[in-house]
């Protein structure tokens, strides 16, 4: 595919992605923060729904031979250290590398600083990678290891079973904490609005 | 098309839409959804104006050109566009900073929040590049492919994030 065609495809897929991030409300720093404080679970619900859909879609595509998986290599140290640094960064920024762009689209000003910071973070890694980071990055390398390989079972069997477990978890989570009550009256993830005039009914 | 003017979808519907995007990603690009490597594509290309020798770094040159890399750059540009249109259709545009920050940190100047946002951005993408993926690449896409490394990275991400969010901020 030409670069131009790939970019047209990317732009249209991104527009759908961005709309879903905005409508799912994970474009809100408030939604990210309360998820990380484990008080409300909008982000986890959307995240796991995307994972479940991916598991089902890929089971069909791999099962019928339409697609080949492209899993990332398992690098134990890099996954643990990088994942932890990423998690702390998400909490300080109030955004993920993808959702920050949805924040920019909705109009949040601080998100522009997050994005520029992200560009510097990528550059920092690029310059440090060859010398400083290689030893960390390559320890505990197991190659492109996937759970179905470890278990010695076909991908669709493991993926669909795992999807079923996750669906069960979400059904339970929705029962104990319905989503409408979690996004808040202003859809920004904050459930109490002390500044709102008294007696104003909360809109879902 | 009333679903376009809704202020919020259920997180389940929104998540399903994201998951379905794996179909065109695998069919046309032979790759999974991801966002954080595009930060390398953009920043390395920008840096090459100042430091042309950056192209001698293999990691940089691997990310600077080609359909897959620019597909992802267009993808993140599309996210801005989609969120912009969506927030205007539903009458939920935002400006300034979210009220969550006053609640989490107490009173503070906008400059302090902007500095934090910048710092958070540096840390976030630096970490994502070490782990070779973020919430979308490792999270949404990696777990859906049952990649062992992605289970590890996502566990570390949520684990460290939960600790940090409870240590740094007041309850929101």
Image: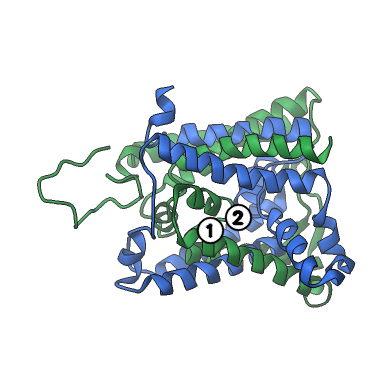
Chain colours: A green, B blue
Q: Residue furthest right?
A: B56
| x and y, in percent, of residue B39 in the image | 68, 58
Q: Residue at x 71, y 58 (%)?
A: B42
Q: Are discs 1 and 2 both within one chain?
A: yes
Q: Which residue is mark 2?
A: B154
| Disc number placed over residue A202 in the picture, else none | none
Label pair 1/2, CB-CB below 8 angstroms: yes
Q: Residue furthest left?
A: A199
Q: Callout 1: 10 Å neighbours few (<14), some, many (20+)? A: many
Q: Residue A154: tell me if it is visible.
A: no
Q: Is residue A136 above or below residue A106?
A: below
Q: Is residue B77 left or right of residue A181?
A: right
Q: Which quadrant of the rendered structure holds the N terminus of chain B?
A: top left
Q: Is residue A12 left or right of residue B116?
A: right
| x and y, in percent, of residue B11 in the image | 45, 38
Q: Residue at x 36, y 54 (%)?
A: A39
Q: Residue B164: tell me if it is visible.
A: yes
Q: Is residue B172 above or below residue B16?
A: below
Residue A56 occupies quadrant: top right
SS of the residue under disc 1 = helix
Q: Which residue is mark 1?
A: B158
Q: Residue at x 50, y 52 (%)?
A: A104
- Chain designation of label 1: B
What is the C-alpha distance between the residues marked 1 and 2?
6 Å
Which residue is nearer to you in this view: B8 or B154?
A: B8
- Chain designation of label 2: B
Residue A156 occupies quadrant: top right
Q: Which quadrant of the rendered structure holds the C terminus of chain B?
A: bottom left
Q: Is residue B108 left or right of residue A130?
A: left
């Amino acid at each position: 595919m030409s670069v131009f065609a790939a970019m047209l495809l990317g732009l249209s897929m991104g527009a759908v992605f961005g709309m879903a991030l905005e409508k799912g409300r994970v474009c809100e720093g408030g939604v990210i923060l309360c998820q990380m404080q484990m008080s409300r679970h909008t982000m986890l619900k959307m995240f796991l729904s995307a994972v479940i859909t991916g598991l089902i879609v890929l089971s069909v595509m791999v099962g019928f031979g339409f697609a080949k998986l492209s899993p990332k290599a398992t690098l134990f140290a890099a996954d643990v250290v990088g994942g932890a640094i990423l998690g702390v960064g998400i909490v300080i920024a109030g955004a993920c590398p993808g959702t920050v762009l949805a924040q920019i689209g909705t109009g949040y000003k601080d998100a522009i600083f997050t994005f520029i910071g992200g560009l510097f973070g990528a550059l920092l890694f690029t310059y440090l990678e060859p010398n400083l980071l290689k030893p960390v990055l390559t320890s505990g390398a197991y190659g492109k290891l996937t759970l179905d390989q470890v278990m010695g079972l076909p991908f669709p069997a493991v993926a669909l079973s795992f999807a079923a477990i996750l669906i069960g978890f979400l059904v339970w989570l929705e029962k104990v904490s319905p989503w409408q009550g979690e996004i808040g009256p202003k859809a920004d993830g904050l459930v109490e609005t002390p500044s709102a005039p008294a007696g104003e009914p909360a809109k879902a | 098309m009333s679903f376009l003017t809704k202020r919020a979808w259920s997180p389940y519907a929104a998540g399903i839409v994201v998951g379905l995007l794996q179909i065109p990603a695998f069919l046309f690009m032979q790759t999974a959804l991801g966002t954080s490597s595009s930060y390398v594509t953009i920043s390395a290309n920008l840096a090459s104006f100042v430091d042309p020798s950056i192209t001698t770094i293999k990691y940089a040159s691997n990310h600077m050109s080609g359909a897959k890399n620019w597909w992802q750059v267009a993808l993140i540009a599309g996210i801005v566009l989609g969120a912009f249109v969506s927030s205007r259709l539903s009458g939920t545009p935002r400006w300034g900073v979210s009220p969550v920050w006053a609640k989490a940190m107490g009173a503070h100047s906008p400059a302090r929040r902007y500095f934090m946002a910048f710092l958070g951005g540096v840390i976030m993408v630096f970490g994502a590049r070490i782990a070779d993926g973020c919430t979308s690449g490792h999270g949404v896409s990696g777990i859906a492919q049952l990649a062992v490394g992605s289970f590890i990275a996502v566990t570390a991400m949520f684990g460290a994030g939960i600790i940090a969010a409870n240590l740094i901020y007041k309850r929101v």
